[in-house]
Amino acid sequence: MFKLLRHVSLFLITACLLLACHSSAPTKLQRPPLKVQFGSFVGEYPGIIAQEKGFFQAQGVDVELIYKRYAKLEQANFSAGKYDGISLSLGSFMILSATNPDIQGVIVIDESTGADVVVAKSQIKTIADLQGKKLGANLGGFSEVFVTEMLKSANLTSDDISFVQSEALDIPQRLKNNLIQAGHTWQPHLTEAVKLGGHILFTSKETPGLILDMIIFRKDIIRDRPEDIRGFVRAWLQASSYWKDHLQEGNTIISKALNIPIHTLSLEGIKLTNLADNRQFFQSSNPHSIYKTAKIYADFFIRAGNVTRLPELKGLFNSTFVNPPS
């Protein structure tokens, strides 16, 4: 009887241990997916490759990517807690942070080195020809800073033109209908604008370091799920590298996922960043650091009255996920 009881006890203990192991093993998988929204700029697309190639999964993080074309609405949804993360230009992120300080940028995903363009109607031959004309831009963010830098290059100011609030995807039809005479856009909308008779007037090649895109997360997600964000960052950078090395395959994956023409996908004028780039961006002593570029935006937004106060710049960025542990 004693031996029987002993065997039964051992069986019960083993069963309990197995049950405990079984119930605790999937805990990691039971976390909700990181919900990250992205838009229509090609530099935001490595996430699609990371998803389709299983890079997120390999890093142990479940990610739900949400593709939306209208940026302003999605920023509001992000602030309302609908998403955990969002891809934003540096300028748009800073504007959003003025009303929602509980967010931080964790990685620079791309730098525009010619992909952002101002496209104009055929009669607008030079930037100076814009005087007295209507210029489409997404006001209150990086778009306004970009076109202002363009105007400055021809000794014009925003007082010399009329701004028309426009998203990048609105530009082709607004040019066609003569609602504007020039506007800021990018691919795939640039191809449509040129097809409708527009031509490139100015590009971000002439504003090096000004236009950066980032992934932004809510601070509570950063606090509660740092390993998931670390995995997200690793997978994203892996996908960026993969796309550059397998351009046609990457284009095919993205074209199929978003149902957009493959010929509109190009990395020309875009630098997809790697880990070394990010470590440079997040180093405050670097002359091209994100902190110095952020100061340019901050000064512009304060002068223009877009915001009355911005958070302390260093608090906007979290370098934990790109820098080695100290």
Image (cartoon, rainbow, N blue to C red):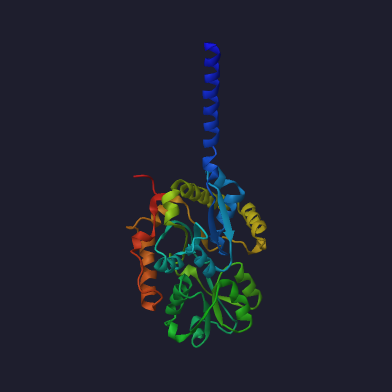
Q: Position of residue 228 (x, y in %)?
A: 48, 47
Q: Position of residue 79 (x, y in %)?
A: 47, 64
Q: Residue at x 45, y 53 (%)?
A: 221
Residue 7 vs 264, above or below: the answer is above
Using the image as rendered, state which of residue 12 and residue 118 is in the foreground.
Answer: 12
Q: Is residue 316 left or right of residue 181?
A: left
Q: Is residue 305 left or right of residue 193?
A: left
Of the 4 image quadrants, the one containing the N terminus is: top right
Which of the 4 image quarters holds residue 284? Answer: bottom left
Using the image as rendered, state which of residue 78 and residue 291 is in the foreground.
Answer: 78
Q: Position of residue 210 (x, y in %)?
A: 43, 67
Q: Is residue 28 left or right of residue 246?
A: left
Q: Residue at x 43, y 69 (%)?
A: 95
Question: Residue farthest to the front?
Answer: 1
Using the image as rendered, state which of residue 29 and residue 24 is in the foreground.
Answer: 24
Q: Residue at x 39, y 50 (%)?
A: 320
Residue 89 vs 62, above or below: the answer is below
The answer to whether residue 255 is visible is yes
Number of residue marks: 0
Of the 4 image quadrants, the one containing the C terminus is: top left
The answer to whether residue 288 is visible is no
Question: Residue farthest to the bottom?
Answer: 132
Q: Position of residue 140 (x, y in %)?
A: 45, 74
Residue 267 vs 58, above or below: the answer is below
